[in-house]
Amino acid sequence: MRKRFESIRRAASDDPAWFCFLMFAGAAMLSLPLARLFLGLSLFFTIRAKTRLRMTPPAWGWIAYLVLAIVVTAAVAAANTPWGVEHGFLEKVDKYIEPAKGLRKTTKLLWYVSIPVAATLVNSRKRLRSVIGAMLAGGTALALWTVLVNPVIALMQTYWHPSCGFIDKLLSSRIWHTPDGRPISIHHALPYLGTMHDAQRLMVTLVCGACAMAATHREGGPWHRQAVAIAISAIALVVTCKRGPLVIGACVAFAVLVTEFRPWRILPFAVLLACAALAVPTTRARFAALPREFDPANSGRAAMWTIVVPRLHQQYPYGIGFRSLTARKMRRTSKQVEKHRNHVHSSPLQAFVDLSWAGVAVWLFWMGAATACAVRMSRVFPPLSAAPLCALSALIVFSLVEYNLADGAVIPLYGLAMGIASAKGVAKTKDSPTEIAQG
């Protein structure tokens, strides 16, 4: 143990920027404040070492989207005032949008600085292995918490009658309560303990674990640790009861594993995962309700896509401003939208509402450039180098039905995938047989 602490201390003193970046990669799967802290430290040490940040196509896509968001939102904020109405920019002041608040929210996009930081610091295959290992460690820790702790809290919510005190309030601070203050059942309490943030983190853990497992098996190393991480992540995704991350993560992981293992060895586990998911009543009910999600008369999500988005674009053809949409504006546009919803559950459609066609064009360039870099990276030394492509593909596909582009907890996942995908130094180095065996 003392030798391990000594090696950690030596690594932190030899290259603090890289050490903090590894901590950021692990913390990104667990805690947003910790992730931002370590990313800030990594950026600070990188700049102090006079290392020039590598600006790759995904990084330029981020800069373009950030500049466009600031310009459009500032223009809408100026127009949505008595001065703007007086000069004919708008017919009247719209009190149901908040472009001034949206302008402040553009600071969230600054955390995409992880793209150039990752592209700069991940400059060898050994470092690529290390950063994916850090992500798997953080994601597995989150999965263990989800599997072991969340069900216990759900049971306590169900059977512990809330009376007073902080813990009682914490346990009863969920919906689906009976008249005496308890949840209807554990199956109703459990989904609200696993957030969509955690589900996307677990999805990335699952696909990166599949790439690491396939790579270790191909090189003849022990792959059982990665298999355990995959199994725990899959179970955690079932516990969170989130359809999108579960289906997308499982499909991408299965596609990776069948390239290395024979299908008959993987198919039983896929069937077992499907049976486990359908065995949870809440998950089964959510899958059964999937056809209604595309009916505007019964689904708030479909109403957003088919009613809210066209009407908002008609009212604001140049964009409403970055994250300027409010729940009140959504409800005034369509009563079918659920309460407390201030986005349209789709990244490209949200870019369309916020920044009009220019936002969609920049978003397509950004995601396209990142995907192209990830495809090139996947050919360097597959299947491990395919991890950025798998993670990015899963996030982009899920972003079609869930707005995650400016989600603070998901931005580090995007940044890691895009930054590693554009790390050109990885292709110029080779691993020794010992490093390959150790993973």
Image: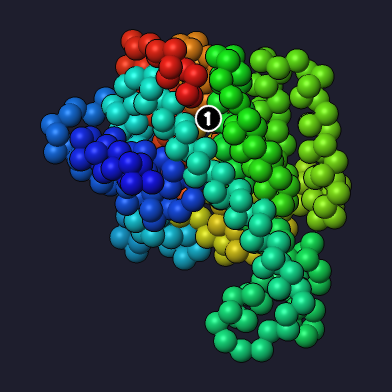
Q: Work out whether residue 359 can be spotted.
A: no
Element under label 1? Answer: helix
Q: Position of residue 60 (x, y in %)?
A: 33, 27
Q: Which residue is rendered at x = 76% and y = 52% of the image?
A: 299
Q: Is residue 267 above or below residue 310?
A: above
Coloring basis for residues? rainbow
Q: Work out whether residue 220 can be spotted.
A: yes
Give the image quarter of residue 244: top right
Task: Please name whichever residue, 175 or 403, is drawn nearer the observer in this view of the structure.
Answer: 175
Task: Please name whichever residue, 8 or 141, is drawn nearer the observer in this view of the structure.
Answer: 8
Q: Which residue is rendered at x = 24% and y = 39% of the image?
A: 10
Name the residue type under label 1. Leu
Give the image quarter of residue 383: top right
Q: Which residue is rendered at x = 41% and y = 30% of the image?
A: 130
Horizontal arrangement in the rendering, residue 210 relative to residue 83 (left or right): right
Q: Position of residue 126 (x, y in %)?
A: 38, 22
Horizontal arrangement in the rendering, residue 195 relative to residue 319 (left or right): right
Q: Which residue is rendered at x = 31% and y = 60% of the image?
A: 83
Task: Please name whichever residue, 427 or 411, is drawn nearer the observer in this view of the structure.
Answer: 427
Q: Is residue 105 above or below residue 18?
A: below
Q: Is residue 41 above or below residue 158?
A: above
Q: Position of residue 396 (x, y in %)?
A: 56, 32
In the picture of the structure, the residue carrying the numbered disc 1 is 392
Q: Is residue 401 above or below residue 338?
A: above
Check the image and name the residue furthest to the front.
2
Check the image and name the residue furthest to the bottom.
164
Q: Position of residue 263 (x, y in %)?
A: 78, 18
